[in-house]
Image: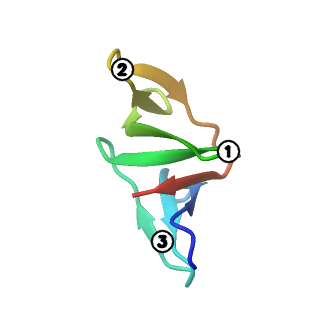
Amino acid sequence: MKSRWKEMHYNEELDCWVVFWGDNTGYKMRCGEWFDLHLGNGRTLSCRLELGRDWYILTGRNDVRFYLKKNETYHVDL
C-alpha cells in the first residue's frame, strides 16, 4: 500500500516549497494552500502555507504560526 505522505522540500532556485511524488515530479506550493503535516506517531496537523519575511504555516483556531526550516524535509498530504 502506498503511503499518503509525500516529501516537501524547499527549492532555492524556485524560492518555494515543492511536494514530490514518487516519480520525481513535483508540485509547487503557493501561499494559502492547505495541507496536513505529519508529526509522527499517527498525529497530523492541518495547516496553511504563508509567506512573510520567510515561509511559515498557520494552524488552529488562533492561527498559531510556525516557521519552516529550509534545510528540513517535511512529510505532507495535500
Residue annotated with mark 2: 63
Name which quarter of the figure residue 46 lies in: top left
Q: What mark, if any, has residue 41 been given in the picture?
A: 1
Image quadrant in which the C terminus is located: bottom left
Residue 20: horizontal and vertical position, in percent?
53, 69
Of the residues tagged 1 and 3, which is closer to the observer? 1
* Mark 2 residue type: Asp
CA–CA distance in space, label 3 to label 2: 27 Å
* Mark 3 residue type: Gly
Residue 25: horizontal and vertical position, in percent?
50, 78
Residue 73: horizontal and vertical position, in percent?
66, 52
Earlier residue among tags 2 and 1? 1
12 vs 62, left or right, is: right
Earlier residue among tags 3 and 2? 3
Q: Crowdedness of circle 3 by 10 Å Cα count: few (<14), some, many (20+)?
A: some
Image quadrant in which the N terminus is located: bottom right
Q: Is residue 29 above or below residue 51?
A: below
Residue annotated with mark 3: 26
